[in-house]
Every structure is written in structure tokens, then in C-alpha cells.
Image (cartoon, rainbow, N blue to C red):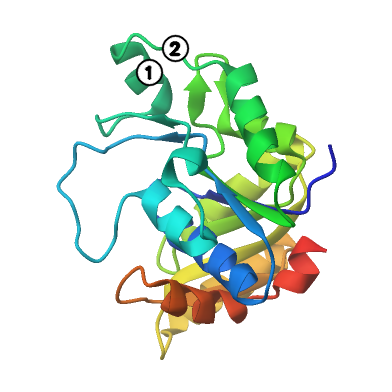
Amino acid sequence: MSVRGCFVTGTDTGVGKTVLAASIAAALRAGGERVAAFKPVVTGLDEPADRDWPPDHVLLAAAAGSDPAAVAPVRFGPPVSPHLAAELAGEPLDPARLRAAFAAVAADADVVVAEGVGGLLVPLARDWLVRDFARDTGLPLVIAARPGLGTINHTLLTLAAARAAGLTVAGVVLGPWPEAPSTIEADNRATIERLGAVETATLPRLRRGDPALLAAAGAALPLARWLG
């Protein structure tokens, strides 16, 4: 199955993957596309609720205009790695089931925005990584990264891990990007672009997960070039 879209991954957990994925989905939807959002597994639902930022699958569903249950077919309470959450629940993850769920949501859309869990080498099952799932989707990667100290190493390692598996990287997005970037932030962006041989864009800090705010942020990204 040939699918148009992108797979959003990150250099680590907590780097803004879901905000980036939701921004892309909201911008595409605002442009008149039929958008599907997909995240194979959500963990951490036992964590306290945030009024401004709902759980990942709920935020993605609001951005894409879809059902949260379809966005994330598997959901767990503990804030741990997916493979461990599944084992604790006595429900080991089945790669075939997740591939089928992805294909089902993608079949009814013009474009699909998939998001991983943590970084590329996070295990979804004991012997099946996020990187493996990204390769199964056939989508180009968009990598979410922090703008500050340490991001050069983390981002270049992620690029290396992706390319070693034969994945295509469309771009890197640094965020939240300040209105007046510091010397180190500006240099980090330029260095990643030069050493990583990858286009590097930015996403501003957003106050809340409002679809209109997300769409405005996503519209500033070079989506037509990255998604084809």
C-alpha cells in the first residue's frame, strides 16, 4: 500500500513529538485534506490530566478531526515503555495487529500523520522497535528535537539510526523555538543541518493544544516538500 504522509519521531521522550504531529495534521486538515492520525501505543494515561494539553491520542484526534480510539488502538496507564506496559497488563503487543490498524486508518484518508513512541529504538514488543514500525509504514521521517544543549548529538544519532535502517528523513524540527533564539540555539540548528545533511525547521512554543494554534504553527513548515 502506497501512503502519502509522514512519520514523526523524536530524539527522546518529551521532545514535542505529539505537538509536532498534531501541528502537521491540523495544518493539512485546514488546507482541505482528509487527514488520518495514528499512534500505535499510548502509555502514561495514569498521569494527572493537563487542562491545556490532553493525552496524545486525544490531541491528535482533535487535530485530524477523528476518533481518539482509532488514533491509538492500544492504550495503557503506566508511564513506561510500551513493551513493559503491555507485559504488565498481560497483553503483549502484536506487530501484525498494529500494522493492520495503521492500514485501516490510512485507507480512508488523503494523507496520514503517524507518530512513534519515544525515540526510534524504543521497543514496542521485545523484538520489534519503533524504527521497525516506521519502516513498515513506508513514510518519510520528520524528527522532533530540542533546540538547546545536547541536541546536536541526540539528533545526529537519530539520523544515523534512521538511515542505517534505510529510512528516508524529510526534515528535523526544533522546538519549542524561541522568538529570539540564543547563539547556541541558532548554531545548533545550523550545525544539525550541515552535519546531518537535512533540512531543519522550527516550531514555536504553543500555549495550549488548540487546533487553530496547531494549524498555524504547522502551516509554517515545508509540508508540501516533505510529504510530496
Residue 60 appears at what percent x and percent y? 46, 55
Horizontally, residue 185 falls left or right of residue 49, namely right
Residue lying furthest left in this view? 48
Instruction: Give the vertical position of 208 relative to 131 (above or below).
Output: below
Residue 16, compared with residue 168, is above or below; it is below
Residue, x 72% and y 37% (percent of image)?
137
User: What residue is rendered at 69% in x and 62% in y?
Assistant: 195
Q: Compute the Cα span from label 1 to label 2.
A: 5 Å
> Which residue lies under the disc numbered 2?
92
Tell me what residue is drawn at x 39 percent, y 12 percent.
91
Residue 62 located left or right of residue 158: left
The kind of secondary structure element at disc 1 is helix
Residue that appears at 80% across and 38% down: 166
Residue 192 placed where, x, y %?
A: 62, 65
Residue 191 in sight from this viewpoint: no
Q: Name the residue under label 1.
A: 86
Q: Which amino acid does label 2 sit on?
A: Pro
Of residues 168 and 148, the one drawn nearer to the viewer in this rendering: 168
Q: Do the residues labelled 1 and 2 touch (CB within 8 Å)?
A: yes
User: Quadrant of the image for the C terminus?
Assistant: bottom right
Q: Position of residue 57 (x, y in %)?
A: 41, 47
Q: Residue 110's image quarter?
A: bottom right
Where residue 131 appears, as percent x and y from the top left, is 63, 34
Residue 99, quarter of picture: top right
Residue 91 appearing in the image: yes
